[in-house]
């Protein structure tokens, strides 16, 4: 289990020791006046856990059918399942504030157990929130229901899928594997790799997140350029809904009506719980070749990527960092000494003189069968050179690879110093990529000026590319406004998300919607799209027990009344829109009608 | 417009003159005793058109808002829109039997006109069947509604999209184009190719079918190995439903909830009318390289394909014909004379001696940028040789290419001689491909024995390949059983479809569901999947005006009562299943409730 107040292994902190420049550089651009920690995480004993609302009939029923070690009602487990890992989640957790916690945590072991639990939850009107790694950063796993029934406030179950972590079978001829949804990244890869296969899905949260979570949120991994997003690897699945189970066929593709797999993928637990999936797998790559380059500008890097895609030479991974993020990367390197330092300085001078004034790092990866990989790599490198890519060799790739899963720990580190830090990601077509990039950076910097004399960090990288466009991933940080931290956080989120949508980009490329992005869903998929989504929700989950108040836009009264902790800005923005809404989803503070 | 009684250009018939062997060979395997035509198409004047059920208020309303030449109520237009092009459609059309025809045909010119028409149809409770090229072979465009309202039987509009045929814009940076849904293949390709682009979608029906039809049925084109199925090329779309319009965002991908594009794709007009789509386009390939090969067996060909995919060398097209279909192809060739004939004979002898006793033809195509294409082609050819592919050079590819859009005309030709002829296609994972293939061929041949002393034609080809599996496409023909033609036709369809589903294949890979395949939909997507689909149908189309009684399973009373022409076998099969069903979709013979 992760820290209850932060990211990852409770024994681990961000490795600062081998990055002597980093803190000085960050302190300077964030205008930190001392290196004293300004905020501390409260002691576990200081956390004020709300008392549980227990539906005893439900508890009795599931207890009679499961083993003792599958059901927990203690506060430690409840706390661990109260939050995902968004900045807002951590902000509250660190202060020991828990407004709502799940009332019990159940660890199912089989698909049939999930069916039994769901049936019982449906009968007893108990909410079910699927919990994979708990790494969601948009409020996707937080309990957000205060429906009052005859028995009081509804019980909320956090359904922790961690014990359903097996690769059930591999079909080597068809390149498919049947995998349980609770398998976390390393578990799943180890089981596949033992047999010579790989799923090839490595999101930043890989060490903790699960297959079911990836599918429920349309996750993208680092090698998505070669293997696609998780939905592209999906062949078939099982999803347990309150009224029954959706089972799709294990076939390469079909034209038997709309692809029901794609109705389930991205549904974020609001329709039911994904229990297993047949996934396309890949032979374990014989070659893994990662290289670093410097481009004179972000624009040159973008142009190089476009030409590679255009000519159909597709690497497994392309990560292009803008000048802001490249500076962060340079400051994370261990300083060289002696001859190496001299050489590095000379290279730097040479690059500066020849026009690399805002150097941008690209990490590029090639994986696969030797011959194919070699040819693609050769052709790609020719194109990169055309755009003045300066080779940094293999070490940069290795450094990046070593630290890639450590970055989330850095957030915990800087939060100790009173820093607000968040990420925002989107995707846009190639003709809109640079306009969206420029506008977003400009808006964030303007806000730094408004709030903090211009101090703040913002960087961006292109993390996933497609023939038609790419994903832009922004990271930003600035000093918290004491006493107004959540308003500040949400106003950044609103500003950036509005900028994405106004400029033709998508609400989210791979972080999903959860609670935090739901106000923009109507803009994203149109009112009629929302109607379709709600119809499926109501038909599969008539009592609204499945991860309520996620994905679909929520009434503003909900945000104010139940979760008064939300910033008024967010509420204001939804007011006009929410007025038009009515019906099923709006009745969430009252007893739901039983169909 | 196509022939009202058959395929394609009314001026055109299947070119037999350059295939002197074909008819003798076919006559022999089908056991035709004479070459006299046994059935004739009735004269147009003999066609008995049902009288129209006209909702005058609706007609008045749309007439006041459209031009005169956009609305037709004459019998010629009604006849042309009464049927698609399935064997059953043609069987009835040729006899002059039209049980139900659309009552009026409207040709919209803009998205806004479609919105107006749909709104009016919704208000007046009038059915709307989108009509693209009318090439559907599973009953997808046939009027199948007999709902009785206060004003009598409901009016049915066939919404012919042919005038919405423009490429509205091309975004060369993003490799996308906005295209109206009524554009037929050649229209759309010409407009794109003028600007140096191609959609790269060439289904067998290419000359007549439309973008909207492709999207509504999840069509696959001949180059799908390189470019994907139509749904893989889709970036965003507009679909007009009775309660509103779904508009999705033009972004490369997203994780903002389930992909609403994929809710619409494959919906076959039951949710509304697709009016335009933004599609991924490709630079017009500089190289088009098609080659023919002979494999000693189907199995060797399959193994060769699998190794190509395994090593990630992906041609644009692979078409592997089994021995049955290869024989047909050999018999379609013009006979050689002189030295060429001698050479051909020697090659044939050599191949027979060295084990090519059941020779299987493979046509393989490479398209794209010269360097990339050359490398892929070289590597693929190396693999093919490993599996004893014998090169036939480029001519076979050319011959196939020349005749590829003529094959549907052959059906009309053989139907004149009292032959039942149909196609069936599916997809399965690689571990199931050969078992499904063997079992299906066996079942068809057994039926030839039962019905016709074993006389009949059956052949199969692999037409589309994926990393996880492939599409199997069967063609079969045998003598009609006079007086019992439809029972015969449906019993073949039932036999083959049951065989597909029992052996783990899909109901259909690219022909879609329409009316004919709907009894198997529950087996394909599970009862809970049907529930989800129905929920969206009811929410977007509460009066069930959009292409009623397609895609979703229909009550057996409907099949018997309203369309008594259907075979009793089909009805029987659905009886048990249908009993469980109730609710909205079952009330189709009564007035629908108005929300």
Image (cartoon, coloured by chain):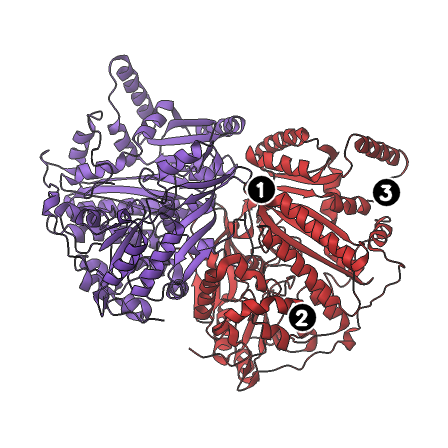
Chain colours: A purple, B red
Q: Is residue A454 visible?
A: no
- For the C terminus of chain A, give its image quadrant: bottom left
Residue B170's tag is none
- For the N terminus of chain A, give its image quadrant: top left
What kind of element bears circle 2?
A: loop
Kindly indicate the quadrant of the structure image that contains residue B74: bottom right
From the image, tell me which residue sits under label 3: B335
Mark 2 vs mark 3, CA separation in Å:
43 Å
Residue B344 screen position, x and y as percent: 84, 35
Task: Determine contact: label 2, label 3, CB under 8 Å.
Answer: no
Do dots 1 and 3 share one subunit? yes
**Up-down relation of residue B478 to residue B109 (above or below):** above
Q: Nearer the viewer, residue B64 or B132?
A: B132
Kindly indicate the quadrant of the structure image that contains residue A559: bottom left
Q: Earlier in the sequence, mark 1 or mark 2?
A: 1
Nearest-to-viewer mark from 1 and 3:
1
Residue A72 screen position, x and y as percent: 23, 50
Q: Is residue A514 visible?
A: yes
Q: Nearer the viewer, residue A398 or A210?
A: A210
What kind of element bears circle 1?
A: helix
What kind of element bears circle 3?
A: loop
The reply, left or right, for residue B390 in relation to residue A60 is right
Residue B431's tag is 1
Do dots 1 and 2 share one subunit? yes
Q: Chain of mark 2?
A: B
Q: Chain of mark 3?
A: B
Kindly indicate the quadrant of the structure image that contains residue B296: top right
* Other-residue count near label 3 (Cα within 10 Å), few / some / many at <14 / 14–19 / ≥20: some
Q: Nearer the viewer, residue A6 or B437?
A: B437
Residue B566's tag is 2
* Residue at image location 74% in from the left, 53% down from the top: B446
Q: Nearer the viewer, residue A67 or B342?
A: A67
């Amino acid at each position: 289990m992760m820290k209850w107040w932060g990211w990852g292994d409770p024994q681990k902190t961000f490795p600062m020791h081998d990055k002597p420049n980093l803190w000085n550089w960050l302190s300077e651009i964030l205008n930190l006046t001392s290196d004293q920690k300004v905020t501390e995480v409260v002691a576990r004993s200081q956390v004020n856990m709300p008392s549980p609302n227990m539906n005893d009939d439900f508890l009795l029923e599931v207890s009679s059918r499961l083993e003792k070690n599958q059901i927990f009602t203690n506060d430690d487990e409840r706390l661990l399942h109260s939050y995902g890992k968004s900045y807002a989640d951590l902000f509250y957790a660190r202060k020991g504030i828990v407004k709502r916690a799940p009332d019990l945590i159940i660890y199912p072991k089989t698909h049939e157990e999930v069916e039994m639990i769901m049936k019982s939850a449906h009968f007893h009107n108990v909410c079910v929130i699927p919990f994979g790694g708990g790494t969601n950063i948009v409020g996707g796993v937080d309990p957000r229901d205060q429906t009052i029934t005859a028995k009081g406030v509804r019980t909320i179950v956090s359904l922790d899928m961690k014990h359903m972590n097996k690769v059930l079978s591999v079909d080597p001829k068809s390149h498919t594997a049947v995998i349980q949804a609770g398998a976390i990244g390393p578990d799943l890869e180890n089981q596949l790799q033992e047999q010579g296969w790989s799923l090839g899905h490595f999101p930043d949260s890989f060490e903790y997140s699960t297959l079911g979570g990836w599918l429920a949120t349309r996750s993208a991994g680092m090698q998505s350029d070669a293997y696609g997003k998780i939905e592209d690897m999906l062949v078939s699945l099982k999803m347990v809904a309150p009224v029954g189970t959706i089972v799709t066929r294990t076939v390469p593709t079909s034209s038997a009506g709309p692809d029901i797999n794609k109705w389930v993928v991205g549904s974020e637990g609001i329709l039911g719980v994904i229990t297993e999936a047949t996934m396309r797998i890949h032979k374990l790559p014989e070659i893994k070749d990662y290289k670093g380059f410097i481009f004179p500008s972000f624009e040159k890097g973008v142009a190089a990527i476009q030409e590679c895609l255009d000519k159909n030479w597709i690497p497994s991974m392309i990560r292009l960092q803008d000048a802001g993020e490249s500076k962060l990367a340079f400051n994370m390197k261990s300083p060289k000494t002696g001859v190496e330092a001299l050489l590095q300085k000379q290279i730097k001078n040479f690059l500066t003189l020849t026009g690399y004034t805002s150097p941008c790092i690209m990490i590029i990866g090639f994986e696969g069968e030797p011959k194919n990989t070699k040819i693609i790599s050769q052709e790609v490198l020719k194109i990169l050179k055309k755009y003045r890519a300066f080779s940094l060799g293999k070490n940069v790739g290795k450094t990046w690879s070593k630290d890639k899963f450590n970055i989330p720990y850095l957030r915990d580190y800087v939060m100790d110093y009173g820093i607000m830090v968040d990420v925002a990601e989107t995707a846009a077509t190639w003709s809109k990529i640079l306009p969206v990039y420029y506008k977003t950076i400009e808006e964030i910097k303007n806000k730094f000026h408004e709030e903090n004399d211009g101090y703040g960090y913002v960087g961006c990288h292109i993390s996933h590319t497609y023939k038609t466009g790419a994903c832009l991933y922004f990271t930003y940080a600035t000093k918290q406004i004491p006493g107004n931290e959540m308003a500040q956080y949400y106003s950044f989120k609103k500003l950036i998300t509005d900028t994405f949508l106004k400029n033709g980009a998508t609400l989210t490329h791979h972080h999903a919607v959860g609670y935090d992005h739901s106000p923009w869903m109507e803009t994203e998929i149109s009112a009629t799209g929302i109607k379709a989504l709600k119809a499926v929700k109501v038909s599969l989950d008539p009592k609204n027990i499945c991860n309520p108040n996620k994905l679909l836009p929520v009434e503003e009264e909900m945000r104010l009344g139940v979760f008064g902790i939300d910033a008024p800005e967010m509420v204001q923005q939804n007011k006009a829109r929410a007025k038009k809404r009515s019906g099923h989803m709006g009745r969430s503070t009252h007893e739901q009608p039983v169909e």
